Amino acid sequence: MTLANRLSEPGCGCDAPENGGSLLSIDAALGLISGHANAVAGTETLAPGAARGRILALPVLAETMLPPFDNAAMDGYALDCVALKGDGPWRLTITHRIAAGQAAMDPVGATQAARIFTGAPIPPGTSAVVMQEEADRTGDQILLRRRPSAGQNIRRAGEDMIAGTQILATGERLDLREIAACAAAGCARVTVRRPLRVALLVTGDEVRDAGATLGPAQIRDINTPMLRAALSGAGVHLAHVERTADRRYALQACLTALADEVDLIVTTGGVSVGEEDHVKPAVTDAGGRIFFAGVALKPGKPVSFGRLGRAFWLGLPGNPFSAIVTWQLFGLALLRRLCGQTGGAVLRRHVVTGAPIRHRPGRCELRPARLAGFDGMGREVAHFETATHSARVAGLSQADGLIFIPSDADYLPEGSLVEFQPFCDR
């Protein structure tokens, strides 16, 4: 049995001293996003059923208690267990029949029982419900052979919710479970954050749409449809999708115009340090401020974050896998901050490697991984390719998430403990 080699430092290790330079660790970059980005102003009021995926701007309080009255937890017979004398068996006469939706007004006597159905109100004079399988019925009588306990099979009024108590907090995302809680609380309307207005700006003279004839130096545009999908859905309004030439002044003009219209600008490509990488200079030319430019990870080192006017800017690398990695790490975190979401962050957990890993020290490497069950110690096992390729996406559909290879590791044997972050759509 191979024991896990525990990480010698917290997190991914990309803040290790050997990284040097001005590169930030992943967690430090996430901290800057958290420190600078706040929820956009503006709210809407919607019916809960129309608010799936939206973020609460005000808490949800229970309008009434739930259940609103004592009721039967199952089909059976309501009776007064205190009135049962001796050791039994006991024979009781059925004098009432109460279905869900019917009021139970007449009291049940000491030697009587009420035929009752799930959800029906508990009649006066009874203290327990005996499930129908535990009562022998003959005509209008039942025979009990075991004494029920007080409160048995009764849902008490208010045991789920008390009127006025908070059911959902500000910042929670409304999905199926939360909408069910709203309905149970009697909430007819919820106040949610307005949709986030986003612009997607894809750079690259060489990229072409699917279906277009490719020239000898041209490639398919992967990032536009990929990030369109990432930015679709409730809570986000994708206001602009544009492709610009790799020209500094054209980029500056486009960024300046978009900054007046949206809350977030996402760019892909042009954030490295080459002569043809013009996005960061264009941001600063337009009066923007860059909070970080470069993170100690592989792939995706050039990822950048800043602000331009009223809009935040996230600069993703142009290589598709690098763009996916940095969107998963930083894009989703930024979206949650701007939408005012207080929970739901994708949490890393530990898994063990299904094969040895060789790694060049210096940056934390993120590698696509597929979970393949558990080992003999009950730990999840991750399988992965032997190297990370920033431009390859063909195998991504088979991956469940990303493993974090610590920056200072040059070799990890099979069974080593590493961090894992599952892929998440929002």
Image (cartoon, helix red, strand yellow):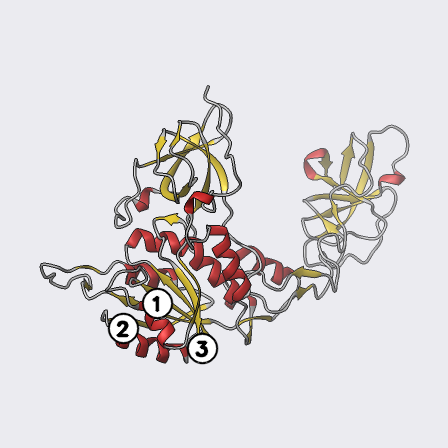
Which one is nearer the viewer's eye here, 114 or 344? 344
Rendered position, 236 above or below 158:
below
Amino acid under label 3?
Gly
Amino acid under label 1?
Lys
Rendered position, 417 above or below 362:
above
Within 10 Å of the Cα at label 3, are there few (<14), some (14-19), or many (20+) other Cα atoms? Answer: some
Q: Position of residue 180 (x, y in %)?
A: 58, 58
Which one is nearer the viewer's eye here, 221 or 92? 221
* Residue designated by label 3: 309
Within 10 Å of the Cα at label 2, are there few (<14), some (14-19), or many (20+) other Cα atoms? Answer: some
Q: Position of residue 241 (x, y in %)?
A: 31, 71
Q: Earlier in the sequence, mark 3 or mark 1?
A: 1
Label 2, label 1: how far apart the Cα atoms are: 9 Å
Mark 2 vs 1: CB contact within 8 A: no
Q: Which label number is shown at residue 280?
A: 1
* Residue designated by label 2: 248
* Left or right, residue 89 beside residue 417: right
